[in-house]
Amino acid sequence: MSELTFEQSLQQLEQIVSQLERGDVPLEEALDAFQKGMVLSKQCKEQLANAEKTLAKMMTDANQEVPFEEAKNE
């Protein structure tokens, strides 16, 4: 599966969940969809974690990265 944007991954995940909730999918297709959903879920989680790490850092006047909490206290 190629690298999707967070929004694309989330949209596909929502479609899979809707499809599985309807219950009108043959077992083999449901298993495949579930596995794809797990991969998409993991990708979304990793993308969110990376975004959180990025947002938790700020640049000082000297162009040094510092944790956001330290920057607030300065």
Image (spheres, rainbow, N blue to C red):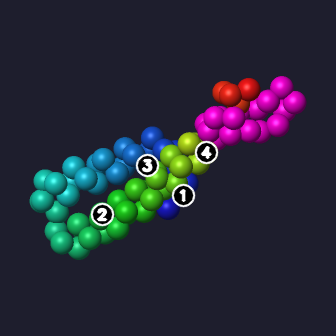
| Sequence order check, earlier mark of 2 and 1 | 1
Which portion, as a residue range, is magenta? 54-70
Secondary structure beneath disc 4?
A: helix
**In the shown orientation, is residue 1 left or right of residue 74?**
left
Which residue corresponds to mark 3?
9
Q: Residue at x 39, y 46 (%)?
A: 10
Spot occupied by residue 20 in the image (x, y as percentages of width and height): 20, 58
Q: What is the distance, in whole Å, between disc 2 and disc 3 at their CAs?
A: 13 Å
Q: Residue at x 36, y 49 (%)?
A: 12
Decide which of tag 1 and tag 3 comes sooner along the chain: 1
Measured in 3D between alpha carbons, the distance from the residue under mark 1 to the one under mark 4, in whole angstroms, is 23 Å
Return the mark for residue 33: 2
* Residue 62 in the image: above or below residue 51: above
Which residue is tagged 1?
2
Which residue does the image show at 69% across and 35% down from the upper left? 70
- Dot 3 amino acid type: Ser
How many marks do you count on the picture?
4
Quadrant of the drawing holding the C terminus: top right
Q: Quadrant of residue 3?
A: bottom right
Q: Amino acid at mark 1?
A: Ser
The quadrant in which residue 67 appears is top right
Near mark 3 (Cα within 10 A), the count class, few <14, some 14-19 or many ≥20, is some
Location of mark 4 (residue): 53
Residue at the front extreme of this rendering:
73
Using the numbered discs, state the Cα–Cα distance from disc 2 to disc 1 in whole angstroms: 16 Å
* Residue 1 x %, y %: 50, 61
